[in-house]
Protein backbone atom coordinates (compact mmCIF):
# COMPACT_ATOMS: atom_id res chain seq x y z
CA UNK A 1 0.00 0.00 0.00
CA UNK A 2 1.50 3.32 -1.05
CA UNK A 3 0.48 6.44 0.85
CA UNK A 4 1.40 9.99 -0.18
CA UNK A 5 0.42 13.36 1.28
CA UNK A 6 -0.60 16.46 -0.66
CA UNK A 7 -2.15 19.85 0.16
CA UNK A 8 -4.91 21.41 -1.91
CA UNK A 9 -7.08 24.52 -1.65
CA UNK A 10 -10.75 24.75 -2.55
CA UNK A 11 -12.53 27.67 -4.24
CA UNK A 12 -13.17 29.54 -0.98
CA UNK A 13 -9.53 29.34 0.05
CA UNK A 14 -9.79 26.53 2.62
CA UNK A 15 -6.82 24.18 2.63
CA UNK A 16 -7.28 20.44 2.89
CA UNK A 17 -4.88 17.54 3.05
CA UNK A 18 -5.26 14.70 0.58
CA UNK A 19 -4.06 11.18 1.17
CA UNK A 20 -3.59 9.00 -1.88
CA UNK A 21 -3.76 5.27 -1.36
CA UNK A 22 -2.99 2.69 -3.99
CA UNK A 23 -3.68 -1.02 -3.90
CA UNK A 24 -0.79 -2.97 -5.41
CA UNK A 25 -1.74 -4.70 -8.64
CA UNK A 26 -0.16 -8.03 -7.71
CA UNK A 27 -1.08 -11.41 -9.16
CA UNK A 28 -4.45 -12.57 -7.81
CA UNK A 29 -4.97 -9.12 -6.31
CA UNK A 30 -8.53 -8.06 -5.49
CA UNK A 31 -8.84 -5.53 -8.33
CA UNK A 32 -7.20 -7.76 -10.92
CA UNK A 33 -9.39 -10.71 -9.97
CA UNK A 34 -12.48 -8.50 -10.26
CA UNK A 35 -11.52 -7.47 -13.82
CA UNK A 36 -10.89 -11.08 -14.82
CA UNK A 37 -14.29 -12.08 -13.45
CA UNK A 38 -15.96 -9.32 -15.46
CA UNK A 39 -14.23 -10.51 -18.62
CA UNK A 40 -15.28 -14.11 -17.88
CA UNK A 41 -18.92 -13.01 -17.51
CA UNK A 42 -18.85 -11.29 -20.89
CA UNK A 43 -17.17 -14.29 -22.53
CA UNK A 44 -19.88 -16.58 -21.13
CA UNK A 45 -22.60 -14.36 -22.57
CA UNK A 46 -20.70 -14.22 -25.88
CA UNK A 47 -20.66 -18.01 -26.16
CA UNK A 48 -24.38 -18.18 -25.37
CA UNK A 49 -25.22 -15.65 -28.05
CA UNK A 50 -22.98 -17.33 -30.65
CA UNK A 51 -24.67 -20.66 -29.94
CA UNK A 52 -28.10 -19.05 -30.24
CA UNK A 53 -27.20 -17.41 -33.56
CA UNK A 54 -25.91 -20.72 -34.93
CA UNK A 55 -29.03 -22.63 -33.90
CA UNK A 56 -31.54 -19.97 -34.99
CA UNK A 57 -30.92 -18.76 -38.56
CA UNK A 58 -33.59 -16.07 -38.24
CA UNK A 59 -32.05 -14.54 -35.10
CA UNK A 60 -30.60 -11.08 -35.67
CA UNK A 61 -26.93 -10.38 -35.07
CA UNK A 62 -27.78 -6.80 -34.16
CA UNK A 63 -29.83 -7.99 -31.19
CA UNK A 64 -26.98 -10.17 -29.91
CA UNK A 65 -24.55 -7.28 -30.27
CA UNK A 66 -26.84 -5.03 -28.24
CA UNK A 67 -27.19 -7.59 -25.44
CA UNK A 68 -23.46 -8.13 -25.11
CA UNK A 69 -22.64 -4.43 -25.31
CA UNK A 70 -25.22 -3.68 -22.63
CA UNK A 71 -23.45 -6.21 -20.39
CA UNK A 72 -20.08 -4.58 -21.10
CA UNK A 73 -21.45 -1.15 -20.19
CA UNK A 74 -23.07 -2.54 -17.06
CA UNK A 75 -19.70 -3.90 -15.90
CA UNK A 76 -18.03 -0.59 -16.90
CA UNK A 77 -15.28 -2.19 -18.97
CA UNK A 78 -16.12 -0.58 -22.31
CA UNK A 79 -12.86 1.40 -22.20
CA UNK A 80 -10.73 -1.66 -22.88
CA UNK A 81 -13.18 -4.18 -24.33
CA UNK A 82 -14.93 -4.14 -27.71
CA UNK A 83 -17.14 -6.52 -29.66
CA UNK A 84 -17.36 -7.13 -33.39
CA UNK A 85 -18.37 -9.65 -36.06
CA UNK A 86 -15.70 -12.12 -37.18
CA UNK A 87 -14.40 -11.89 -40.75
CA UNK A 88 -14.83 -15.62 -41.33
CA UNK A 89 -18.47 -15.80 -40.24
CA UNK A 90 -20.88 -12.87 -40.38
CA UNK A 91 -23.09 -14.56 -37.76
CA UNK A 92 -20.37 -15.10 -35.16
CA UNK A 93 -19.21 -12.49 -32.68
CA UNK A 94 -15.82 -11.93 -31.10
CA UNK A 95 -14.40 -9.83 -28.28
CA UNK A 96 -11.21 -7.81 -28.51
CA UNK A 97 -9.19 -6.63 -25.51
CA UNK A 98 -7.26 -3.39 -25.94
CA UNK A 99 -4.10 -4.38 -24.08
CA UNK A 100 -2.57 -0.91 -24.33
CA UNK A 101 -5.65 0.77 -22.87
CA UNK A 102 -5.98 -1.93 -20.21
CA UNK A 103 -2.35 -1.45 -19.15
CA UNK A 104 -2.98 2.27 -18.80
CA UNK A 105 -6.09 1.67 -16.68
CA UNK A 106 -4.21 -0.81 -14.49
CA UNK A 107 -2.00 2.02 -13.27
CA UNK A 108 -4.99 3.44 -11.36
CA UNK A 109 -6.59 0.15 -10.31
CA UNK A 110 -7.49 0.23 -6.64
CA UNK A 111 -6.67 3.93 -6.22
CA UNK A 112 -8.85 6.16 -4.10
CA UNK A 113 -8.40 9.46 -2.27
CA UNK A 114 -9.18 10.48 1.30
CA UNK A 115 -9.47 14.20 1.99
CA UNK A 116 -9.19 15.58 5.49
CA UNK A 117 -8.50 18.89 7.20
CA UNK A 118 -6.83 17.16 10.18
CA UNK A 119 -3.27 18.42 10.55
CA UNK A 120 -0.25 16.13 10.53
CA UNK A 121 0.46 17.01 14.18
CA UNK A 122 -2.91 15.66 15.32
CA UNK A 123 -3.00 12.45 13.31
CA UNK A 124 -0.69 10.57 10.95
CA UNK A 125 -1.74 9.13 7.61
CA UNK A 126 -2.02 5.55 8.88
CA UNK A 127 -4.43 6.54 11.66
CA UNK A 128 -6.60 8.55 9.26
CA UNK A 129 -6.78 5.59 6.92
CA UNK A 130 -7.64 3.32 9.84
CA UNK A 131 -10.50 5.57 10.93
CA UNK A 132 -11.83 5.55 7.37
CA UNK A 133 -11.84 1.75 7.37
CA UNK A 134 -13.72 1.82 10.68
CA UNK A 135 -16.72 3.26 8.84
CA UNK A 136 -17.65 -0.30 7.93
CA UNK A 137 -18.07 -1.04 11.65
CA UNK A 138 -20.45 1.93 11.99
CA UNK A 139 -22.49 0.71 9.02
CA UNK A 140 -22.61 -2.78 10.52
CA UNK A 141 -23.84 -1.31 13.82
CA UNK A 142 -26.74 0.47 12.13
CA UNK A 143 -27.57 -2.66 10.15
CA UNK A 144 -27.60 -4.74 13.33
CA UNK A 145 -29.88 -2.27 15.10
CA UNK A 146 -32.35 -2.04 12.22
CA UNK A 147 -32.69 -5.73 11.39
CA UNK A 148 -34.29 -8.63 13.21
CA UNK A 149 -31.49 -8.85 15.79
CA UNK A 150 -32.63 -5.77 17.73
CA UNK A 151 -35.79 -4.73 15.84
CA UNK A 152 -35.30 -0.98 15.93
CA UNK A 153 -37.83 -0.78 13.14
CA UNK A 154 -40.75 -0.61 12.83
CA UNK A 155 -41.42 1.84 15.64
CA UNK A 156 -45.07 1.69 16.76
CA UNK A 157 -44.89 4.58 19.23
CA UNK A 158 -46.14 8.13 18.77
CA UNK A 159 -44.72 10.25 21.58
CA UNK A 160 -41.19 11.60 21.18
CA UNK A 161 -40.28 10.40 24.68
CA UNK A 162 -41.41 6.88 23.83
CA UNK A 163 -39.41 6.92 20.60
CA UNK A 164 -36.26 8.08 22.39
CA UNK A 165 -36.80 5.45 25.06
CA UNK A 166 -37.21 2.74 22.44
CA UNK A 167 -34.01 3.74 20.63
CA UNK A 168 -32.17 4.01 23.96
CA UNK A 169 -33.09 0.43 24.89
CA UNK A 170 -31.99 -0.76 21.45
CA UNK A 171 -28.61 0.95 21.87
CA UNK A 172 -28.17 -0.67 25.30
CA UNK A 173 -28.91 -4.04 23.70
CA UNK A 174 -26.34 -3.30 21.01
CA UNK A 175 -23.75 -2.63 23.69
CA UNK A 176 -24.50 -6.09 25.10
CA UNK A 177 -24.07 -7.61 21.64
CA UNK A 178 -20.74 -5.86 21.21
CA UNK A 179 -19.54 -7.14 24.59
CA UNK A 180 -20.60 -10.70 23.74
CA UNK A 181 -18.88 -10.38 20.39
CA UNK A 182 -15.66 -9.44 22.21
CA UNK A 183 -15.99 -12.25 24.76
CA UNK A 184 -16.79 -14.93 22.17
CA UNK A 185 -14.28 -13.72 19.58
CA UNK A 186 -11.93 -16.68 20.08
CA UNK A 187 -14.70 -19.30 20.00
CA UNK A 188 -15.45 -19.18 16.27
CA UNK A 189 -19.13 -18.44 16.92
CA UNK A 190 -21.26 -15.43 16.10
CA UNK A 191 -23.37 -13.66 18.70
CA UNK A 192 -26.53 -14.89 16.99
CA UNK A 193 -25.34 -18.50 17.06
CA UNK A 194 -24.27 -18.17 20.69
CA UNK A 195 -27.63 -16.76 21.76
CA UNK A 196 -29.39 -19.55 19.87
CA UNK A 197 -27.40 -22.10 21.86
CA UNK A 198 -28.17 -20.34 25.15
CA UNK A 199 -31.86 -20.25 24.24
CA UNK A 200 -31.91 -24.01 24.91
CA UNK A 201 -31.31 -23.40 28.64
CA UNK A 202 -34.38 -24.33 30.67
CA UNK A 203 -35.46 -24.51 34.28
CA UNK A 204 -37.27 -27.31 36.05
CA UNK A 205 -39.88 -26.49 38.67
CA UNK A 206 -39.71 -28.74 41.74
CA UNK A 207 -42.73 -28.87 44.10
CA UNK A 208 -42.20 -30.51 47.51
CA UNK A 209 -44.98 -32.33 49.43
CA UNK A 210 -45.31 -29.41 51.85
CA UNK A 211 -46.11 -27.09 48.93
CA UNK A 212 -42.73 -25.38 48.80
CA UNK A 213 -41.51 -24.94 45.22
CA UNK A 214 -38.23 -23.93 43.69
CA UNK A 215 -36.55 -24.05 40.31
CA UNK A 216 -33.54 -26.09 39.28
CA UNK A 217 -31.37 -25.48 36.22
CA UNK A 218 -30.34 -28.70 34.46
CA UNK A 219 -26.71 -29.27 33.53
CA UNK A 220 -25.92 -27.11 30.46
CA UNK A 221 -24.43 -28.62 27.33
CA UNK A 222 -20.68 -28.39 26.72
CA UNK A 223 -21.26 -25.64 24.18
CA UNK A 224 -23.33 -23.60 26.62
CA UNK A 225 -20.77 -24.16 29.38
CA UNK A 226 -18.06 -22.73 27.16
CA UNK A 227 -20.20 -19.73 26.22
CA UNK A 228 -21.10 -18.96 29.81
CA UNK A 229 -17.52 -19.40 30.98
CA UNK A 230 -16.22 -17.02 28.31
CA UNK A 231 -18.82 -14.46 29.38
CA UNK A 232 -17.89 -14.88 33.05
CA UNK A 233 -21.37 -16.13 34.02
CA UNK A 234 -21.94 -18.90 36.56
CA UNK A 235 -25.45 -20.29 36.75
CA UNK A 236 -26.87 -21.15 40.19
CA UNK A 237 -28.05 -24.70 40.76
CA UNK A 238 -31.31 -23.58 42.41
CA UNK A 239 -33.56 -20.54 42.16
CA UNK A 240 -36.49 -19.37 44.15
CA UNK A 241 -39.58 -20.06 42.09
CA UNK A 242 -41.10 -16.85 40.75
CA UNK A 243 -44.61 -16.97 39.37
CA UNK A 244 -44.24 -13.64 37.58
CA UNK A 245 -44.99 -13.87 33.84
CA UNK A 246 -42.90 -11.66 31.60
CA UNK A 247 -44.63 -10.72 28.38
CA UNK A 248 -42.03 -10.10 25.70
CA UNK A 249 -42.49 -8.29 22.41
CA UNK A 250 -42.61 -11.60 20.51
CA UNK A 251 -45.16 -12.98 22.98
CA UNK A 252 -47.39 -9.97 22.36
CA UNK A 253 -47.19 -10.51 18.60
CA UNK A 254 -48.25 -14.15 18.97
CA UNK A 255 -51.21 -13.36 21.22
CA UNK A 256 -52.43 -10.32 19.26
Image (tube, grey):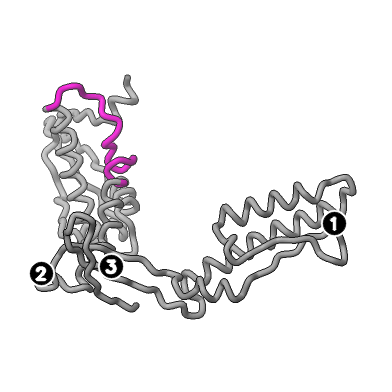
Above or below, 167 relative to 124: above
Q: Secondary structure at mark 1?
A: loop
Which of the two labelled residues, at mark 1 and mark 2, occupies the earlier sequence position? 1
Cα separation between marks 1 and 3: 59 Å
Which of the two labelled residues, at mark 2 and mark 3, occupies the earlier sequence position? 2
Cα separation between marks 2 and 3: 34 Å
The residue identified by callout 3 is 186
Q: Nearer the viewer, residue 111 or 134?
A: 111
| Residue at the spot 15% in from the left edge and 65% down from the top edge | 118
The magenta stretch is: 143-160
Asked whether residue 209 is in view, the answer is no
Q: Residue furthest top?
A: 256
10 Å neighbourhood of mark 3: few (<14), some, or many (≥20)?
Answer: few
Above or below, 139 relative to 148: below
Q: Position of residue 237 (x, y in %)?
A: 16, 50
Quarter of the figure with the C terminus: top left
The residue identified by callout 1 is 91
Amino acid sequence: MYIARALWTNKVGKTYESIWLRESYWVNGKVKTRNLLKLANVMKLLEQQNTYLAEHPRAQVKTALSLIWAKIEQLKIEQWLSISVTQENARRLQITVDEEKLSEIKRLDGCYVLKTDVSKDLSDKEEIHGRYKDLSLVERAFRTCKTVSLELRPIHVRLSTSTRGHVFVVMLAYMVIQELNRLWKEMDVTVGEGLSHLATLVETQVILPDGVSFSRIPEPTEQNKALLKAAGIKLPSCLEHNKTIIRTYKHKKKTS
